[in-house]
Amino acid sequence: MSSLTVYDDTRPGQPEFSSHDAEAIAARLSPLNVRFERWTDVEPPARDAGQDVVLGVYRPYLDRLMGETGAGSADVISIDVNTPNRAALREKFLSEHIHSEDEVRFFVHGQGHFVLHVDGKVYDVGCTQGDLISVPTGIPHWFDAGETPDVVALRIFTHKEGWIADYTGDDIALRFPAQIA
Ligand SMILES: CSCCC(=O)/C(O)=C/O
Ligand SMILES: [Fe+2]
Ligand code: NI
């Protein structure tokens, strides 16, 4: 189930807002220019479908999204307990970072948390199958799918180089572990 938990960044463990309602989540994130939507009118491909199949299933949606965002390419990231480099991948996404393009992701299967750090608040957004999230350029954030990850996500890139991050050097992610159910 999608979720949002909001904290003051000086008060770990003391949420000031919490919701599992997609409309409430979208409304709370909208002032940050974070886009949050549920796309439920398409049947997801099988969990083990290849990248081309996944991209094919979502092609009409991707084309529209890429038209709206100016993105030039898309890929599929798939992580589960059998992913050999899952610990390294977790480490890579788990430190606070920014991107010089919007981070646009669609959850095809499983779940993961994007945790955003904006104006003294921490927004832990639990994304699940059918969720689209777009985190604007320059918003500090991190991502965690936990110790036993299960996530397949579409990633949409503007830069030709694909995924590039600038780490902020802030260890805030250690104080606000994602609330993985
Ligand atoms: C679910 S997509 C993998 C995470 C990622 O690309 C990123 O930048 C997290 O912040
Ligand atoms: Fe990121
Ligand atoms: Ni919950």
Image (cartoon, rainbow, N blue to C red):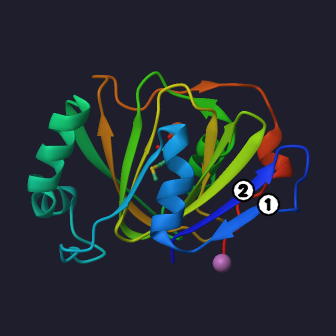
Instruction: Decide if residue 84 is in sight here.
Output: no
> Residue 160 placed where, x, y %?
27, 22
> Along the line of sight, which residue is nearer the eye, 148 or 64?
64
Residue carrying label 1: 16
> Residue 27 placed where, x, y %?
50, 56
Instruction: Give the quarter of the figure containing the C terminus.
Output: bottom right
Which element is circle 2 on? strand
Residue carrying label 2: 6
For the image, the number of numbered tags is: 2
Label 1 or label 2, whichever comes before in sequence order:
2
Which residue type carries mark 2? Val
Residue 5: mark in rendering: none
Which residue type carries mark 1? Glu
Which element is circle 1 on? loop
In the displayed structure, does residue 6 sit left or right of residue 59?
right
In the displayed structure, does residue 100 sit left or right of residue 60?
right
Residue drawn at x 72%, y 56% as measured from the top left: 6
Dot 1, crowdedness within 10 Å: few (<14), some or many (≥20)? Answer: few
Q: Is residue 105 above or below residue 18?
A: above
> Is the residue under label 2 in contact with that under label 1 (CB below 8 Å)?
yes
Q: CA distance from mark 1 to mark 2?
A: 6 Å
> Along the line of sight, which residue is nearer the eye, 167 or 10?
10
> Residue 26 placed where, x, y %?
47, 57
